[in-house]
Structure formats: structure tokens, C-alpha cells
Image (cartoon, rainbow, N blue to C red):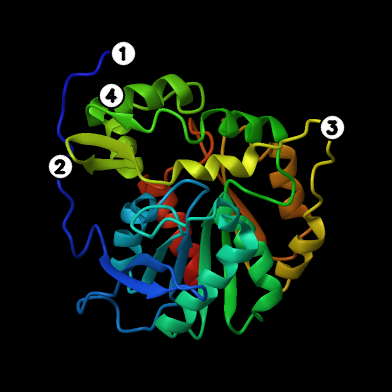
Amino acid sequence: MSFAPAEIPPFDPVWNGGVPFSYQSPDGLTLAGREWRPRQSAPSVEKIPVLCLPGLSRNTRDFRDIAAFLQKQGHHVVALDYRGRGESAWDDDWRNYALPIEEKDIDAAIEKLGLSRFAILGTSRGGLHALAMARRYTPDRLAAVIFNDIGPHIEMRAIHRIAATLGRNMSYSSMTDVAQSLRQLLGMQFPVFSEADWLKLASQLASGHEGKVVLDYDPALAHQFASLDDAAPVPDLWPLYDAVKDRPVLIIRGSQSDLLSEETANRMVETHPNAELHSVQGQGHAPVLWEPETHKRIAGFLNRI
């Protein structure tokens, strides 16, 4: 597949891109997020708010399509940029790019936005946050969880794959070059993607700065994986999954995923009294949440809460 130079069409700054907001972390960093509030023409029945938490090096742009769709259904949708990602400030200490620090940032955003009851849509790392939050928030607050290609058992080969590229090749001459790089790295995981799909994905991961196109995260994030040990045991997160068994769960898995195995996804359904599985064909880690079928499946799940 060859790529012709192309410009990414602009997204509506209000409805597709969400309305930006900022807040302070407990340790003083300025963090960012976006929210999509229901349109006036949305259904009058109050729908549950949805908190979207992205993957390790990702940002709020990953949720543009699903957020705009849920907004039209009457949901208030919020997406957060972790520290060092997207529009949030970078941390001078890379050791703070850690789950325990980020969870305090997430709690601060929930308090700022006054989310008294909500569901989580967590992609990859966002799903790990959801597992931990199920112990901090009771079902009358955190009412449901959507896990996007993540579960209590993580395939370490996928972690090594991600670690091998994190923080490298951060700057490109064009968005087309970003798309070509993504296709080389992820083509086996997304075999059905067209040129337009790769360009769209590139626009979610990168943006223009001083005449260059750069990936929107602090490359120091890679230090989190500097000490990966092949001999170390894989963390057992199944006890954390027990904490979500008192609320509905939707598991989204890419059929090509190397991080969430089919075996783990099936076990998540079999051991949970109110869980369902949605498989996205032709996509790997993590499903991009663009397709109408996935939109409808997520909306239907939320409507049943």
C-alpha cells in the first residue's frame, strides 16, 4: 500500500472534538480533558455519564467518534489526558507516570466535574484503572465498566512489543509519514485498515508543532518499561476483577489482539454474572471504536444499566 500526501479533515471543535477543560492534579500539574455534553435535541430520559480513560501513550482524541455518537444518544461523555499525554502537562519526574499517581489525577477530575454516577470506558491502561476504581467507588457511583481490549491477565509479549517502540521516533515530517510508520508497526494487527484509516489513526496519535508532526506524549514514559524482566511473574489481577462482579461489564476484544487473549476474554464472561463480549473483527490492540456496530453495542449496553 502506498500513501499519497493527505491532509486530515478538521473535526468540529465542539461536537466531534469535545469541549476542552483543565484542572489541577493533587501535586499541582495542569491536566486536560474534553467533554461532550448532550445536545438539546437528545432524548429527554437522563442517560448515565461515561468517563473515557485512554491507553498508555494515548489521548482523548481516541474517543472522538464514540463520544460524538453517545452524545447524540443523550450521554454526557468525558475523556481525560493523563499527565504527560495529549494536552496535559509533562511531569519533570518520569516515575510519576504510574498508575497510583494517575488514579489520584482521575479522582480529582471526577470531583471537579461532579460526576455522582458514571460508567467507565477504559482502553488498555484505562481498563486497568477501572479495575482499581471498582474498589474505590461503589456500584452506586461507578455503575458499569466497558473494558476495551484489556483484562485481568495481560499477555507479556504484547507489553514487550509496546515497550520496544515507546518513546522512539517521536517526530515526523508529515501526518502521512506517521500513517506509514503505524502501518509498518501495526499492519499485522489491523489487516483491514485502508490508507484513510491509517491517516485517521495518525491524527489521533500526533499533531503539528513548529513545522513538525510529533506524537502527543512525553517520551520519558518509556522509562516505565526500562526494567522489564522476562523472568518476573505476570501480575495476577483476577482478584481485582472480583470487585466488578457486582456491576455490569462489557468486554470489547479485537480479534487480532496480542494483549487480551480469547481465553482471558471468555473467562471474564464465564466468571462474571453480568458480563458480555463484543469481538471486533480485523482489529488488534486496541480496537479503535470507530465502527457503527461497536457504537450500537456500547450504547445498547449503557441503556440497560
Q: Earlier in the sequence, mark 4 or mark 2?
A: 2
Q: Is residue 113 above or below residue 6?
A: below
Question: Do labels 1 and 4 touch, CB within 8 Å?
Answer: no
- Residue 1, labelled with which disc? 1
Which of discs 4 and 2 lies nearer the camera? The answer is 4
The secondary element bearing badge 2 is classed as: loop
Q: In which quarter of the image is the C terminus?
A: bottom right
Disc 4 designates what residue? 177
The secondary element bearing badge 4 is classed as: helix
Classed neighbour count for the residue bearing mark 2: other residues with Cα under 10 Å, few (<14), some (14–19), many (≥20): few
Disc 2 designates what residue? 9
The secondary element bearing badge 3 is classed as: loop
Q: How far apart are marks 2 and 1 (CA)?
A: 21 Å
Name which residue lies at 82% across and 51% down: 236
The secondary element bearing badge 1 is classed as: loop
Q: Is residue 30 above or below residue 230?
A: below
**Residue 166: percent from left, percent from top:** 51, 35
